[in-house]
Image (cartoon, coloured by chain):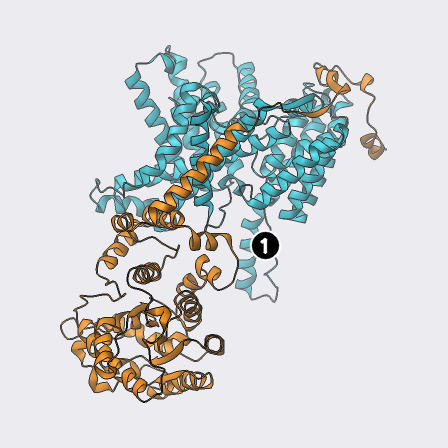
């Protein structure tokens, strides 16, 4: 059951109807049951892993909260270690299993290797981070451990965000479950708009763009000119952005109908004018997690060691370590590590610059410089990582092809037709500083736009196997 | 002890130094209530009206002849260009002139070989009857996919005859993926009684068919260009003209010959497709089916596992299936009819070869009609 499928929407509608029929005190329980039903529909084993992690973290947070001092710290470390080891096991298992299978085959041992594949539970990376942040918040006494197992289980398993985030914080999520809320006309319209924007971004823009990118470019980086490579890489980046942003919009819209506000994941990253700004706008729930639990603690620790703000380690280490952790969280592979180092260097470069001379904030720069900065940041911040991650092992061949081709051959220009509607939504959102700018339009214009979007979604969704969201793979 | 400690929740009042306590403030009234006030859903209603308006007007517009002539041929969502082209050309022929009396069905071999106009002339000369024919040859068509298309053709146009050009290769598909492209097409599945929404939509909506063509143009620019070129070279009767190349002036490359050798060596009769054929022939008794052994270039015959013997053995099975179901079986033309100059490559005829072959076939079928071995076409009221 993919989130953009009809089955999912039927499931959502059923849960929604039940949600408003049953007494309020059972609403959270219903959401929890629905979340597990949803997860079991993907895999029972995945649901069992989630259940174990939920129970352990729920109990362990209480165990941490009971003591102070060194024991408290020790318990926290054990808790983080437990979550990390489970995550690492599933992330790395397949890599090692493949080596073992190869070895078994090489030695000619009579073992059946068919059943040796270990599947990464969908959403594991996301709810592991939620569990760790919860333990850390309890340890730092920023929140008490949750008293209700149902609430905490829902925090871990809430079905709209289960498969690919946003990575919620217990401090923000749990209080919502204990408040009295209402679904009024405005919030219903906003949630509905978010779902439509999300579906449009995913089905019309992202999936079609992915279909337009030549297969041989993705798979083996066949011969293309420099300009073609640049355009296809950026098309891929734009598709990734629309895929993930579309997903987030949809799940936030769905969650809105249950009166639960999920964290915003994107704030117009295409308009970022430097890398720091970019990471404040791209996958915000992850970057803020990394900022709060890795970047700031590491910076504080380094400053305590050496209070000199111009100290190299103080400037370079926090962004470098943060980006490396971010890359390894995505995938513990060399290609991702290279991307992490690249991003770490870029961010450290910006910090070095600002440490030694005053830097104008990007918004104060002349418009032409802002435009150049936006383009460069998008190309370097999105394009280079995509190139590194998808073509890491064929970069040499790719560059060889570039040298053998006229650099100015253009791909089919119709690809821009698909980019335009996605970009138009971004421009509107950016200029109005509002995620759902259409809500303030005249009813007739709104209706016309909704009709066009619905027809586009309806037609584009036909005769195509629903592509899973890219970030579900992490 | 440890477990007991872990499972016992501490009393909230005993908890250590909590900085934030506001989470507990709202504990009294948790939950979400529905607070929708009238009027609501006006935008939704308006947009529904817009959708209806848009769909109705675009359906009306896209079904008019002038608009269809400006736009490229629509699509039923098949990446197989000849299927899309033939479906719509036949539809236009039926609209403009009436449904055809005879439809030629088969793979790319049939697509290249049947020239409806030449056939009509030869047939008229032999029987004195004026008929209308259409070439529904579809590239990569296998026997199984062919039965599905035959069902559709009979269902939609109820022709008096279907002349189905077959070869042993149709029973032993060499490219599973290509074969499935036709069989799994939503519209083909829908027309064969397998309910699916996309297939239904392609069947009833011209807006959707044009949208599918637009999406194809978007996603496969090169193939879309090729498709438009093929359409411009195809007659209203489904025959592709101007294939003038021949294997004397353009010898077949050795690599291609090896490719044929490899494929032909693996040809064997599969029971599945024959059973499908039997089922299709048994189902449609209002249409006369003629199974025609398509001509092969002599070079290919020796590539079969046991040479011409394999070919004869497989065609024998097709022949007996045809006879069992009362269908007519027509042998291939004598080898001397077609010379090297008539072949586009080792499997397909060129324009010259197609003219010769269609003339020969027109006469053969005409003779069979005159001898009462086949029903006389051109008599049915519904096809005039």
Chain ID of residue with mark 1: A
Q: Position of residue A35 (x, y in %)?
A: 67, 39
Q: How many marks?
A: 1
User: Is residue A213 shown to the viewer in this render?
Assistant: no
Residue A310 versus residue B120 in the image, above or below: above
Task: Name above or below for residue B104 compared with residue A70.
Answer: below
- Residue at 44% in and 35% down: B50
Up-down relation of residue B320 to residue B278 (above or below): below
Q: Provide residue A286's location: percent of width, then percent of height.
A: 54, 29
Which residue is found at the position 41% from the left and 28% from the top? A425
Q: Quadrant of residue A379?
A: top left
Q: Nearer the viewer, residue A80 or A199?
A: A199
Residue with the most extreme top position: A358
Q: Is residue B168 visible?
A: yes
Which quadrant of the rendered structure holds the C terminus of chain B? bottom left
Judging from the image, what secondary structure is the residue with disc 1 in? loop
Residue at the left extreme, as displayed: B249
Q: Which chain is orange?
A: B
Give the left or right position of residue A58, taking residue A433 as reference.
right
Q: Quadrant of residue B106?
A: bottom left
Q: Which residue is mark 1?
A: A117
> Crowdedness of circle 1 by 10 Å Cα count: few (<14), some, many (20+)?
few
Question: Where on the picture, by quarter, is residue B159?
Answer: bottom left
Q: Is residue B316 left or right of residue A43?
A: left
Q: Which chain is rendered cyan in the image?
A: A
Please name the residue shown 58% across and 37% down the image: A125
Q: Residue at x 23, y 65 (%)?
A: B240
């Amino acid at each position: 059951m993919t989130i953009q499928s009809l089955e999912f929407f039927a499931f959502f509608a059923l849960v929604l109807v039940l949600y408003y029929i049953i007494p309020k005190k059972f609403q959270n329980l219903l959401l929890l049951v629905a979340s597990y039903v949803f997860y079991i529909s993907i895999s029972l084993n995945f649901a069992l892993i989630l259940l174990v992690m939920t129970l352990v973290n729920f109990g362990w947070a209480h165990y941490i909260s009971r003591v102070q001092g060194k024991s408290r710290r020790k318990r926290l470390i054990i808790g983080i270690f437990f979550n990390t080891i489970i995550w690492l096991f599933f992330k790395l298992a397949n890599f090692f299993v493949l080596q073992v299978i190869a070895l078994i085959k090489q030695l000619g041992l009579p073992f059946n290797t068919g059943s040796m594949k270990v599947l990464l539970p969908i959403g594991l990376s996301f709810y592991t981070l939620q569990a760790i942040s919860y333990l850390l918040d309890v340890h730092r006494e920023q929140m008490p451990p949750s008293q209700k197992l149902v609430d905490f289980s829902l925090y871990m398993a809430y079905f709209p965000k289960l498969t690919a985030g946003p990575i919620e914080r217990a401090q923000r999520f749990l209080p919502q479950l204990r408040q009295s809320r209402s679904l009024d006309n405005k919030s219903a319209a906003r949630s509905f708009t978010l779902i439509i924007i999300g579906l449009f971004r995913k089905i019309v823009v992202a999936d079609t763009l992915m279909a337009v990118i030549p297969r041989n470019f993705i798979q083996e980086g066949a011969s293309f000119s420099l300009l073609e490579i640049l355009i296809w890489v950026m098309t891929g980046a734009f598709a990734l952005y629309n895929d993930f942003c579309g997903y987030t919009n949809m799940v936030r819209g769905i969650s809105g109908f249950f009166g639960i506000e999920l964290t915003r994941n994107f704030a117009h990253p295409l308009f970022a004018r430097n890398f720091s700004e970019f990471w404040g706008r791209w996958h915000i729930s992850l970057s803020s997690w990394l900022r709060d639990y890795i970047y700031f603690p590491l910076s504080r620790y380094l400053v305590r060691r050496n209070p000199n703000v111009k100290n190299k380690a103080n400037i370079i280490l926090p962004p470098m370590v943060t980006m490396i952790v971010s890359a390894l969280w995505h995938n513990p592979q060399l290609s991702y590590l290279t991307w992490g180092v690249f991003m770490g260097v870029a961010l450290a470069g910006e910090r070095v610059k600002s440490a030694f001379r005053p830097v104008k904030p990007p918004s104060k720069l002349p418009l032409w410089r802002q435009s150049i900065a936006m383009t460069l940041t998008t190309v370097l911040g999105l394009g280079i990582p995509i190139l590194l991650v998808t073509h890491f092992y064929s970069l040499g061949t790719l560059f060889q092809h570039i040298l053998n081709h006229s650099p100015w051959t253009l791909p089919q220009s119709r690809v821009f037709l698909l980019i335009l509607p996605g970009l138009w939504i971004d421009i509107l959102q950016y200029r109005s500083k509002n995620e759902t700018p259409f809500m303030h339009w005249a009813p007739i214009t709104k209706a016309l736009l909704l009709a066009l979007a619905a027809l586009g979604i309806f037609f584009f969704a036909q005769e195509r196997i629903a592509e899973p969201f890219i970030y579900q793979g992490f | 002890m440890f477990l007991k400690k872990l499972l016992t929740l501490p009393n909230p009042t005993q908890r250590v130094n909590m900085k934030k306590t506001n989470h507990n403030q709202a504990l009294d009234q948790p939950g979400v209530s529905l607070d929708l006030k009238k009027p609501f859903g006006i935008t939704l209603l308006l947009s529904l009206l817009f959708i209806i308006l848009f769909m109705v007007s675009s359906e009306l517009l896209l079904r008019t002849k002038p608009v269809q002539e400006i736009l490229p041929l629509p699509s039923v969502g098949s990446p197989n260009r000849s299927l899309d082209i033939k479906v719509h050309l036949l539809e236009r022929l039926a609209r403009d002139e009436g449904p055809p009396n005879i439809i030629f069905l088969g793979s790319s071999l049939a697509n290249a070989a049947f020239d409806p106009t030449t056939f009509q002339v030869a047939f008229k000369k032999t029987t004195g009857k004026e008929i209308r024919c259409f070439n529904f040859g579809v590239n990569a068509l296998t026997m199984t996919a062919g039965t599905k298309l035959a069902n559709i053709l009979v269902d939609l146009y109820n022709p008096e005859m279907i002349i189905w050009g077959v070869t042993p290769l149709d029973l032993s598909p060499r490219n599973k993926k290509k074969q499935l492209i036709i069989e799994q097409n939503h519209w083909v599945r829908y027309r064969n009684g397998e309910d699916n929404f996309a297939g239904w939509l392609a069947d009833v909506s011209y807006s959707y068919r044009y949208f599918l063509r637009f999406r194809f143009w978007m996603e496969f620019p090169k193939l879309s260009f090729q498709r438009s070129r093929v359409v411009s070279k195809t007659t209203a009767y489904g025959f592709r003209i101007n294939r003038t190349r021949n294997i004397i002036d353009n010898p077949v490359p050795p690599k291609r010959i090896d490719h044929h050798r490899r494929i032909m060596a693996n040809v064997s009769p599969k029971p599945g497709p024959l059973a499908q054929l039997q089922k299709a022939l048994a189902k449609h008794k209002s249409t006369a089916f003629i199974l025609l052994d398509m001509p092969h270039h002599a070079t290919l015959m020796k590539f079969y596992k046991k040479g011409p013997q394999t070919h004869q053995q497989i065609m024998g099975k097709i022949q007996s299936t045809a006879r069992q179901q009362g269908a007519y079986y027509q042998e291939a033309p004598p080898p001397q009819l077609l010379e090297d100059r008539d072949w586009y490559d080792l499997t397909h005829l060129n324009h010259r070869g197609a003219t010769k072959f269609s003339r020969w076939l027109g006469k053969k079928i005409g003779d069979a009609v005159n001898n009462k071995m086949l029903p006389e076409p051109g008599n049915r009221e519904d096809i005039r």
